Image: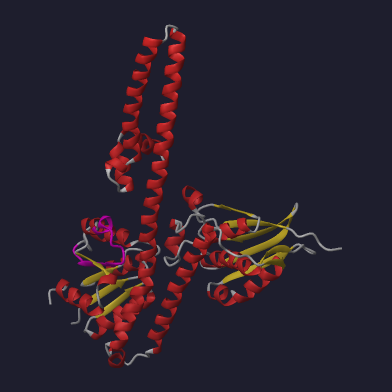
């Protein structure tokens, strides 16, 4: 949060209430101020009692300081908890807003296409109705994909996602995905190259989810490339890890947005300028799975200068 | 002469259904799949009405609206914002930027949008 906003949030409790959309009596900053007044009153009371019962002024100061510190820390801890609850509530509301908007778009497409088909207009215009049935099919899939992504996130966050780990070749998974994405890459005039270190160890992972990770990164690299270019993938060993790197010459990620790139529903302004459909959940899911598989993920990028996404996974020892 | 309507909408399926509906109703339809093309067409073709989405690639509807209303040659072009954003903030932002009407797509049928189009064209 910028410094000005942080100061504003503590000086003006109504600022935070508006931010969270809650009443003043549920507002963490306002409650902190109220508890502050009570703490001051309690400290004064402790001081009065201490001075009347204890003659040693040093001891009185110690008792007052101890009581004061305890009260202030307790107030801060309690209001911090309220703030986390208020923030969770705000995020839940925002989440519902974003999901309902994301679902509304394909639903609107379905609604208008169905209305058009049922109105008799295709016959009047002598157009092929199949075009509209394809629209129904594509948008139904789009809604299904969004719901699948949301359910995946829910399972990831509750730790309830069963992984079927086995020895898999990251190189083979990548090669298969490059073949699968060839039509999309060719339509986007993007070349994909793959360089693998020879005799590379396998990884111990759930192959289905590892495919989702690599597939998502590859899809993004092709999708956000600008008018063609090269997507360059390399897989090699880095210490005891297998390092996967995918580089594109695409729209890149502005520096100010880089810290949000793995957050749910976040889409960089550059990505939105290129293409507006996309849930903003892909990289969040990718990061969660890489970490669940024992790896790390990071990236380097600059606006309009492409991006390189890296992830590592522990290498399996080769059997002798 | 048929009136000209420009649809600035990045969802190609929506473009298809809306433009077919408007053509059948007797209008000439221009189509733009992003804000930049939409702005260019508005400036060159001077349509009788613009149906403008808000979340679009290259230039958002808000940016297009600001440029249209900021230029003497396009400031009087009537604009209906057609979007699925429905927060009061977005509505106020679009209306104060110069949009004549704000319609949430999910709340209207094609026929209802046609009625709004005819009203905006004073038919």
Above or below — where is A72 with respect to A126?
above
Residue A293, image x and y in percent? 64, 59
Determine whether, in the image, residue B28 is placed left or right of residue A68. left
Q: Is residue A8 magenta?
A: no
Determine whether, in the image, residue A268 is placed left or right of residue A228. left
Q: How many marks?
A: 0
Residue A180, image x and y in percent? 61, 76
Residue A42, image x and y in percent? 35, 23
Q: Quadrant of residue B64?
A: bottom left
Residue located at (16% from left, 71% from top): B120
Q: Quadrant of residue A172?
A: bottom right
Determine whether, in the image, residue A243 is placed left or right of residue B13. right
Determine whether, in the image, residue A290 is placed left or right of residue A103. right
Residue furthest to the top: A55
Region of the chain picked out in magenta, as a range? B76-91
Q: Quadrant of residue A197?
A: bottom right
Give the image's coloring scheme: secondary structure
Can residue A191 be seen by looking at this rendering? Answer: yes
Is the N terminus of chain B in the top left, top right, bottom left or bottom right quadrant?
bottom left
Q: Name the foreground residue: B24 vs B86.
A: B86
Residue furthest to the front: A53
Can residue B56 be seen by looking at this rendering? Answer: no
Q: Is residue B87 magenta?
A: yes
Q: Name the foreground residue: A11 vs A156.
A: A156
Residue B17, image x and y in percent? 32, 80
């Amino acid at each position: 949060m910028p410094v000005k906003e942080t100061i504003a949030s503590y000086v003006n409790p109504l600022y935070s209430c508006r931010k969270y959309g809650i009443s003043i009596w549920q507002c963490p900053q306002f409650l902190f101020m109220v508890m502050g007044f009570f703490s001051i009153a309690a400290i004064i009371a402790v001081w009065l009692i201490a001075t009347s019962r204890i003659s040693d002024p040093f001891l009185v100061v110690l008792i007052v300081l101890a009581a004061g510190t305890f009260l202030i820390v307790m107030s801060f801890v309690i209001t911090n908890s309220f703030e986390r609850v208020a923030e969770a509530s705000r995020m839940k509301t925002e989440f519902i807003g974003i999901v309902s908007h994301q679902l509304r778009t394909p639903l609107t497409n379905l609604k208008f296409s169905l209305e058009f088909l049922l109105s008799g207009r295709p016959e009047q215009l002598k157009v092929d109705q199949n075009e509209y049935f394809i629209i129904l099919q594509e948008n139904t899939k789009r809604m299904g994909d969004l719901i699948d992504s949301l359910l995946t996130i829910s399972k990831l966050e509750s730790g309830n996602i069963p992984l079927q780990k086995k020895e898999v070749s990251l190189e083979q998974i990548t090669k298969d995905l490059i073949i699968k994405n060839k039509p999309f890459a060719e339509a986007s005039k993007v070349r994909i190259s793959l360089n693998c270190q020879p005799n590379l160890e396998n990884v111990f992972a759930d192959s289905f989810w590892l495919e989702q990770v690599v597939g998502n990164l590859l899809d993004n690299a092709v999708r956000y490339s600008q008018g063609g270019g090269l997507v360059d993938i390399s897989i090699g060993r880095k210490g005891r890890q297998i390092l996967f790197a995918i580089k594109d010459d695409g729209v890149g990620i502005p520096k100010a947005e880089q810290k949000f790139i793995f957050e749910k529903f976040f889409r960089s302004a550059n990505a939105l300028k290129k293409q507006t459909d996309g849930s903003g959940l892909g990289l969040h899911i990718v990061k969660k799975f890489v970490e669940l598989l024992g790896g790390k993920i990071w990236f380097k990028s600059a606006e309009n200068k492409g991006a390189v996404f890296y992830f590592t996974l522990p290498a399996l020892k080769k059997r002798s | 002469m048929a009136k000209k309507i420009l649809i600035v909408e990045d969802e190609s399926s929506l473009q298809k259904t809306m433009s077919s509906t408007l053509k059948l109703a007797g209008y000439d339809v221009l189509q733009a799949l992003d804000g930049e093309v939409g702005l260019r067409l508005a400036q060159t073709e001077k349509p009788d009405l613009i149906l403008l989405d808000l979340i679009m690639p290259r230039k958002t509807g808000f940016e297009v609206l600001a440029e249209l209303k900021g230029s003497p040659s396009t400031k009087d072009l009537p604009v209906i914002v057609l979007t699925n954003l429905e927060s009061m903030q977005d509505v106020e932002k679009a209306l104060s930027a110069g949009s004549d009407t704000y319609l949430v797509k999910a709340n209207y049928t094609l026929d209802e949008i046609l009625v709004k189009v005819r009203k905006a064209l004073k038919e």
